Image: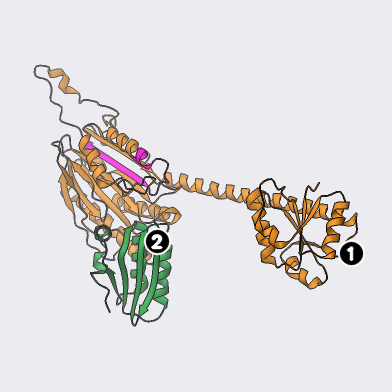
Chain colours: A orange, B green
Amino acid sequence: MLELTLVVSERSPMADNLCAVVNSDGMPARLVSPAEALAGWRAGDRTPDLLLVNAALNLSIVRQLAQRITRTTSRPPTVVMFAERDFRELEEHVMAGLDYIIPPFLPGLIGSRLVACHVRQVMSRTTQDIQTAANLLKYERELQIGREIQAGFLPDVLPSRSGWQLTARFQPALEVAGDFYDAFELLGGARIGLVVADVCDKGVGAAMFMALIRSLLRHTASYLDPGSQPAGDEKIDPGADAAVLVHSIATTNRYLTTNHLGQGYFATLFFGILDPTDGSLVYVNCGHNPPVMHRADGTQDLLWPTGPALGLVPESVFDLETTRLGYGDLLFIYTDGVPEAKDANGRFFTEESMLAIIRAQNSGADELLDVFERRLSAHVGFADRSDDITMLALRRQPEYRAPRGRRSAAATPPRRGRAVDGSRSARR
Amino acid sequence: MGFSATLSRNGRIALITLEGELDALHADDFRNRVEQAANGGQIDQLVLDMTDLTYMSSAGMRGLVFARQKMGEDIRIVLVRASDSVEQTIRLVGFHQSVVFSDEVPG
């Protein structure tokens, strides 16, 4: 049952006697001094499954011994203390939950006692292992639930419009993320709201603020939206989209700074409202990495912040900016996980590489994000993913000019690649 | 790629020296130092020496926001010798109006 017992003690008549008794009970035993035992094990040494330790050794040394054996063999030994003369020495060991034997050390009794201690300790370790595994499983299940709930805070489908491609990618670094993107119809479908945001920090805390900020923005944006009320069809007040934008940003910032300032969470965010009929885009950039406007002629503009991050400063002022997507122009909105993706040596992907990829790509929005995914995953390799990665691309398809003399072809817009082409669901 | 934050005091100035990369892994160290500085008696200024700070992630920015909250309105937060990239991170997020940039440790 027991293959090797080590009696750990300075040499003494009683230690010698104990060693002999264990041997006589048919279980191999050897006496080693504490110094020898701590010096470690040579290759070829058999691993002891039981340590019978003199209670004169203090508890921290006993722990060190057991740890050393566990580390080299990955199997913790059973530990039993014995008292030589002074039973008070046993006290700290017994308090720590260790088994013990006291003299007289009688053949037969000692052998069966040690076997019983060993069986008990092995069983209790097994129970602990099962408990640890169960706790881990529970924790993983909770995270899985968190991930599923968070997925519900991202849009199921993106709005689609004829002549436009809109696509997004989202890769959390951990089970739950602080990034999010959103795209939704506003003003009765006449406008499309686009959001990409990054809540600072990571993990569950960031994920909770992501859910809060996304909900506040969407809620305030759609409740102010006059188009959500059943009235006046095609007529939209000039400036209605700007009003929606200003109102939802200011309300969200006020809510965050009033209720959550002490927690130090904030979100950088880009919120744009697109008019798909003429390509105009009114936007607010709250401290977010500037989205890249890649023009059909190859030039690039960056849409710099127009105000601070949300939740950072009470009563912040957020300016509105406008731009316009012409035919063939592409808007790339991203979070810092893209330029700051790290390879195994800690090197960043960099903003330069990012801009170069956009410059080199002259096809659809989907194709661009495919290229990004491939290049980022090649860069990161086997390194731990350090940050969430979110990308959204909006492209206005190049104007289709019918070849001269073939009028019929002009009736349908071209369909290219896996473009999100919204001929099915026009405005309602 | 390590990080360290050490706190010292000089009269009514608390100085935290930041070194290395301040990312999500190390943000707690920074926050703990800020907390110590806040609880260590009355100060007029919190000075963050960023001479050897090579990188600051958004989690690190959160530590700075936390410091602003913890210190209250009338305590100046001075950032000394922040690198271009760190300063850019702070300006981009729009937090530059809540702190003071400086080239030398005051006092």
Q: How many marks?
A: 2
Chain ID, mark 1: A
Q: Residues within 10 Å of mark 2 (few under 14, many from 20)?
A: some
Going by the numbered disc 1, the residue's amino acid type is: Pro
Q: Position of residue A149 (x, y in %)?
A: 46, 47
Nearest the viewer among B60 and A111 is A111
Which label is found at residue A104? 1
Same chain under badges 1 and 2? The reply is no
Camera-side mark, 1 or 2: 1
**Quarter of the figure with residue A20:** bottom right
Please give left or right for residue A237 compared with residue A387 in the image: left
Helix, strand, or loop for circle 2?
strand
Q: Could you give the CA–CA distance between mark 1 and mark 2, rounded to whole angstroms? A: 58 Å
Q: Position of residue B96 (x, y in %)?
A: 24, 65
In the image, residue A428 sits, relative to residue B55, either above or below, namely: above
Q: Tell me if residue A177 can be seen.
A: yes
Q: Residues within 10 Å of mark 1 (few under 14, many from 20)?
A: few
In the image, residue A420 sits, relative to residue A150, either above or below, namely: above
Inspect the magenta stretch and tell me whether residue A379 lies in it: yes
The residue identified by callout 2 is B3
Q: Are marks 1 and 2 in contact (CB under 8 Å)?
A: no
Q: What's the magenta region?
A: A376-405
Inspect the magenta stretch and tell me whether residue A150 lies in it: no
Q: Position of residue A76 (x, y in %)?
A: 69, 52
Nearest the viewer among A182 and A189 is A182
Q: Tell me if residue A311 can be seen.
A: no
Rendered-image quadrant of the C terminus of chain A: top left
